[in-house]
Image: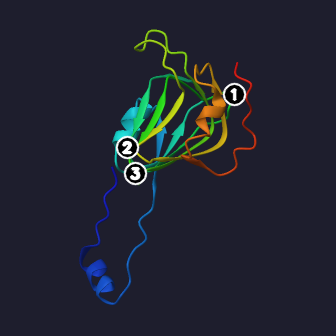
Amino acid sequence: MRKLSLGMAGFLLAGLGWCPTVVAEVCQVPSGTHPTIQAAVDDGDCTEIVLAAQLFVESVLIPRGVTIRGSSQSTSTIVGQVTVQGGTTQVTLEDLTVDATIQGVGGTVDSALQAVGGAELITNSVVVRNSAVDLWTVFMDGFESGDTSAWSKTVS
């Protein structure tokens, strides 16, 4: 984790009205400190999570605002369910696939993407596979925003 230490110079500058810009922390998954997506989500310092080109066999619960970015739809795949929760939570998923077939990880879930409690999910270049829920019902509850025109009813 990176901590911001202003010291005496920072204290004086802050007194003059200058405040440092806090830089968002990008966390790589997997890594020594973040072996799983959930570990990075649980680390409050991670504001952007970048996934390697591989399969991630895990269901992820996201209770805070964060961006999760894969390397591409064809190379970064979450095999499980992604659940976003919380009334002020806004999560962005980009350049990845979410596959709801999770045999051996608590059974197969009904839906690959789920938003509860008023959470907002923004997607860009996301593929959803093997969701038992008809994809059109995903867009009926109003939790998503952005351009969803690339989504189709075809489920593989």
Residue 18 or residue 97, whichever sits in front: 97
In this picture, residue 39 sits left or right of residue 100: left
What amino acid is labelled 2 in the image? Pro
Label 1 element class: loop
In this picture, residue 16 sits left or right of residue 129: left
Query: For the point 37% across and 35% down, which residue is it?
Result: 39
| Residue 33 makes an appearance in the image | no
Query: For the point 36% across and 51% down, which residue is it?
Result: 45
Residue 130 or residue 30, whichever sits in front: 130
Place of residue 105 in the rendered image (x, y in percent of width and height, measured from the top left): 42, 14
Quadrant of the rendered image containing residue 78:
top right
* Outermost residue to the bottom: 16
Structural distance between the alpha carbons of marks 3 and 2:
9 Å
Q: Which residue is mark 2?
A: 63
Residue 150 drawn above or below residue 21: above
Q: Which residue is mark 1?
A: 74
Structural distance between the alpha carbons of marks 2 and 1:
26 Å
What amino acid is labelled 3 in the image? Gly
In this picture, residue 63 sits left or right of residue 75: left
Tag shown at residue 87: 3
Query: For the point 38% across and 78% down, which residue is it?
Result: 19
- Label 2 or label 1, whichever lies nearer to me, is 2
Place of residue 120 in the rendered image (x, y in percent of width and height, measured from the top left): 50, 48
Residue 93 or residue 44, whichever sits in front: 93
What amino acid is labelled 1 in the image? Ser
N-term-proximal mark, 2 vs 1: 2
N-term-proximal mark, 3 vs 2: 2
3 and 2 marks in contact (CB < 8 Å): no
